[in-house]
């Protein structure tokens, strides 16, 4: 494997990694959402984050 291939693989991984890291958070946000509010709660983001901490303690 040449040095250029290593660089290309590292760049591909660095592009994909933020999306992979977001998957568990998006799943938790979808579970916590209620009624018409699914996903991120712009009105009460702090209370939503607290509920994620409760989920993390349970898991």
Image (cartoon, rainbow, N blue to C red):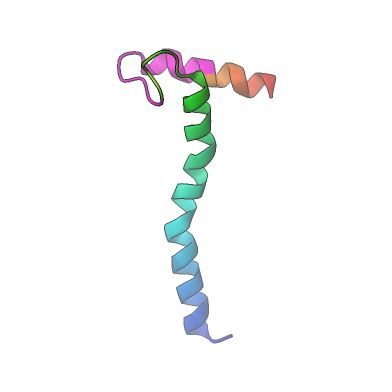
- Horizontally, residue 16 falls left or right of residue 40, namely right
Residue bounds of the magenta highlight: 39-51
Answer above or below: position of 52 versus 3.
above
Q: Position of residue 55 (x, y in %)?
A: 60, 20
The single residue placed furthest to the front in the displayed view is: 36
Q: Which of 14 and 20 is in front in this view?
A: 20
| Residue at point 46%, 20% (across, down) | 49
The single residue placed furthest to the left in the displayed view is: 43
| Residue at point 49%, 68% (across, down) | 10
| Residue at point 52%, 77% (across, down) | 6
Q: Nearer the viewer, residue 7 or 21?
A: 21
User: What is the quadrant of the N terminus in the image?
Assistant: bottom right
User: What is the quadrant of the C terminus in the image?
Assistant: top right
| Residue at point 38%, 25% (across, down) | 40
Answer above or below: position of 6 versus 58.
below
- Horizontally, residue 5 falls left or right of residue 54, namely left
Q: Where is residue 44 in the image (x, y as percent from the top left)?
A: 35, 13
Q: Which of 11 and 41 is in front in this view?
A: 41
Assess whether residue 53 is covered by the magenta stretch.
Answer: no
Q: How many marks?
A: 0
- Horizontally, residue 26 falls left or right of residue 41, namely right
Q: Where is residue 21 in the image (x, y as percent from the top left)?
A: 51, 44
Q: Where is residue 7 in the image (x, y as percent from the top left)?
A: 47, 75
């Amino acid at each position: 494997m040449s040095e250029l291939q290593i660089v290309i693989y590292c760049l591909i991984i660095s592009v994909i990694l933020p999306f992979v890291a977001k998957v568990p958070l998006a799943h938790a946000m979808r579970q916590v959402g209620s009624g018409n509010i699914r996903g991120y709660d712009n009105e009460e983001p702090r209370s939503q984050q607290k509920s994620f901490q409760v989920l993390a303690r349970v898991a």
